[in-house]
Image (spheres, grey):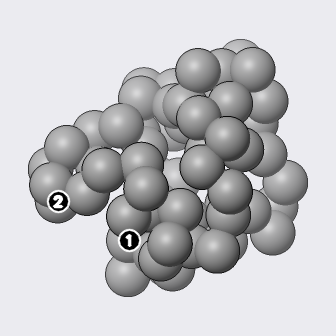
Amino acid sequence: MTLSQRIKHLRNQRNINLNELARRSGIGKATLSRIESKKTLGTVESLVKIAKAFQMSVQEFLEGVEFE
């Protein structure tokens, strides 16, 4: 599973839209969209914020993610 697939999967599983994830994480919707569309991997800081928005540790969040 790629990082973008992982984020989409978690959003769908938890019924969170991109706007809500942006609000919870403090990351702009455009940046999240670029991460989900594989245009960027995001920074370590942004991945930490996304994990916290999903109420997960970074380890849990990245579990099973394959970086290309």
Residue 66 percent across, percent down from the top left: 57, 29
Q: Residues within 10 Å of mark 1 (few under 14, many from 20)?
A: some
Q: Quadrant of residue 3?
A: top right
Which residue appears at 64% of the width and 74% of the height? 26
Tally of numbered tags: 2
Q: CA distance from mark 1 to mark 2?
A: 9 Å
Q: What's the residue type where badge 1 is placed?
A: Phe
The label number, if any, that marks residue 14 in the structure image:
2
Left or right of residue 59, residue 54 in this image? left
Q: What's the residue type where badge 2 is placed?
A: Arg
Q: Is residue 38 visible?
A: yes
Please name whichever residue, 50 or 56, is drawn nearer the observer in this view of the structure: 50
Which residue appears at 59% of the width and 35% of the height? 33
Q: Quadrant of residue 56?
A: bottom left
Question: On the image, numbered disc 1 is attached to which residue?
Answer: 54
**Which image quarter is the C terminus in?**
top right
Which residue appears at 15% of the width and 55% of the height? 15
Please name whichever residue, 65 or 24, is drawn nearer the observer in this view of the structure: 24
**Which image quarter is the N terminus in?**
top left
**Upstream in sequence: badge 1 or badge 2:** 2
Q: Is residue 60 visible?
A: no
Please tell me whether mark 1 sits on a helix, a strand or a loop.
Answer: loop
Determine contact: label 1, label 2, CB under 8 Å.
yes
Which residue appears at 38% of the width and 64% of the height? 20
Vertical side of 56 occupied by 29: above or below: above
Vertical side of 67 occupied by 21: above or below: below
